Image (cartoon, coloured by chain):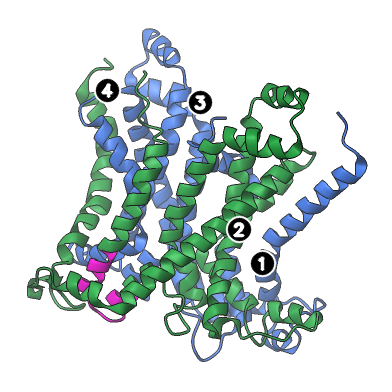
Chain colours: A green, B blue
Amino acid sequence: MRTSRWIALLYVGPAVLVMAAACMYPVFSAFQLAGYDWSMGTPWSSARWVGWANVVSAFGNPRVWSSLWTTLLFASACVSIEMVLGIALALALERPVRGMFFFRTLFILPMMIAPIAVGLVWRYLFDAQFGLINALLGLVNFPAQIWLADPTLAFVAIVIADVWQWTPFVFIMVIAALANVDGSVIEACRIDGANWWQMIFRVKLPMIMHVIAITLMMRLVDAFRVLEVIYVLTFGGPGDSTEILALHIYKTAFIGQQLGVAAAISVLLLVVVALLSWGALHLSNPMQDDTR
Amino acid sequence: MKRPVWLVASHYTMLIALAFLCAAPILVIFTTSLRLQVDIFAEPLNLLFVPSFENYRAVLQEDRLDRYLLNSLFVGLISTGVTLVLGCMAAYGLARFRFPGRQAVAYTTLLLRTVPLAVLAIPVFLIWNEWRLVNSLWGLILLYVAVNLPFTIWLLYGFVLQVPIELEEAAAIDGCGPVRVFTKVLLPLMAPGLAAASIFTFRIAWNEFILALVLTDRHTRTLPVAASLFITDMGVDWGRVMAMASLIAIPPLIFTFVAARQIITGLTAGAVKG
């Protein structure tokens, strides 16, 4: 019974069909679309095949390169801060205490609410006139900053919002990994006289390296997918100082109405993310286990 | 080994500080939504104000948010239901059967999970136009099902593997058909996984913005799209915006408090065996 291919098809088929039609087909279309000159509102039949022209124009556009650079800077800044902070906090607070469950519940709140709501509240907090952050800075006699109108400060603002939202994720992953470490190993090291420093860098961290690597890859992939928070918080501004690639694609397609060029840029983003995902799969593929 | 009191105290102090940092912006959403515009402008830090539901009344009645609220609920619930049924079946098929192309399906599923939605937006806009799915809630539902299936399959796959195959075989010997084995034996044992999967799917479908922005019009908008349109260069009515943000935030917050355990299971699944 278990070997029947037809029954397997019945189970897997519908999901594969939906994913193929509404996810894979669009992704392949993006590649095709990258070769056409098509503006919004016109019928698809009026689109003109232009070959590599879109790709050439996308790669020749300095704004594409600057937004790729912004994306890389944003992703590396967010992910490194989140990893260091999340791991450090998890190591400091790994010991199970009464009420930890309640705290963990509060920690997952930031990643559960809508990115749009996150963007809105941070925009309010960073508001130059009515924002709480300037008001709090005022309490310690620090001059008010025009957060979202200054290129550097605006970049800092989007990093802060992302760090707020995703550091708890790293924390929760690492806490869960530490809880799974065999207690007898820790005990053995303590008896052998390992000090605090050796305990963390020679024993605990190496033992959870696998989880740390997966968490890092998941965060990196997601950092390249961020769009909504920045859309609301700065919309890429001021100038193009916070215009990450995903936002640049959106603007090119739906404001500049150059769908072909936008598709060419999205192929670029897709390649970057695919490379990262390939790395992530290499580290851990939960479905490759073929022992059964 | 008992820890000294000061260590325990500092442990709790840190936890409370972190919890406050996580919760504070969310509290700001709710408190600001209960304040009137004059009040917000007068003194941002003033915590003593008379709460008012005026902003909620305004967004629900004047800005027709009630309609978008229903749209969001409809899209969220239907796409969660469909994703769960299809995802459950696919996870079972992948975990229990060996068939040609199984590896390919497994790998592609995992890769699809990482596709940026901004990349999907452009081709989907074109294809949905051709299929006449633009400005229809069903078009959005189809997309959300497709986008959510990879993670759901991935998560549920692990839960299927945890159910001993002997249980299914025993039920089959006792005369259960394949369908009853699936519904009566497997599904009840996978309940925690199903709970986690449904929360994560609903969260995406309820919170998603960019695809909904591209694919909806005045009638089929969802809440996040409606909220984003409140930000204009002309200045922002923060009270109303926060009333909207809190309407968007409430369902996920309820889920979090009801099912935090399942959410943490879902977050750590695959990376941490537990």
> Position of A50 compared to B234: left or right?
left
Residue topped by disc 3: B189
User: Does residue A162 sit above or below A191 in this rendering?
Assistant: below
Mark 4 or mark 1: whose residue is earlier in sequence:
1
Q: Is there one chain holding both mark 2 and mark 3?
A: no
Distance, label 2 to label 3, CA atoms, is: 30 Å
Magenta segment includes B53: no
User: Does residue A74 sit above or below A88 in this rendering?
Assistant: below
**Callout 2 secondary element:** helix
> Position of A276 compared to A253: left or right?
right
At a point 33% along the width and 17% down the height, the residue shown is B177
Residue topped by disc 4: B98
Distance, label 2 to label 4, CA atoms, is: 40 Å
Distance, label 1 to label 2, CA atoms, is: 9 Å
Q: Is there one chain holding both mark 1 and mark 3?
A: yes
Distance, label 1 to label 3, CA atoms, is: 38 Å
> Which chain is disc 4 placed on?
B
Q: Position of residue B175 (x, y in %)?
A: 37, 10
Looking at the rendered structure, the kind of residue marked 4 is Arg
Q: Tags 1 and 2 in contact by the CB under 8 Å rule?
A: yes
**Callout 4 secondary element:** loop
User: Does residue B84 sit above or below A186 in this rendering?
Assistant: below
How many marks do you count on the picture? 4
Looking at the rendered structure, the kind of residue marked 2 is Pro
Residue topped by disc 2: A110
Magenta range is: A251-266
Looking at the rendered structure, the kind of residue marked 1 is Pro
Q: Nearer the viewer, mark 1 or mark 3?
A: 1
> Which chain is disc 2 placed on?
A
Q: Nearer the viewer, mark 2 or mark 3?
A: 2
Distance, label 4 to label 1, CA atoms, is: 49 Å
Check the image and name the residue furthest to the top.
B173
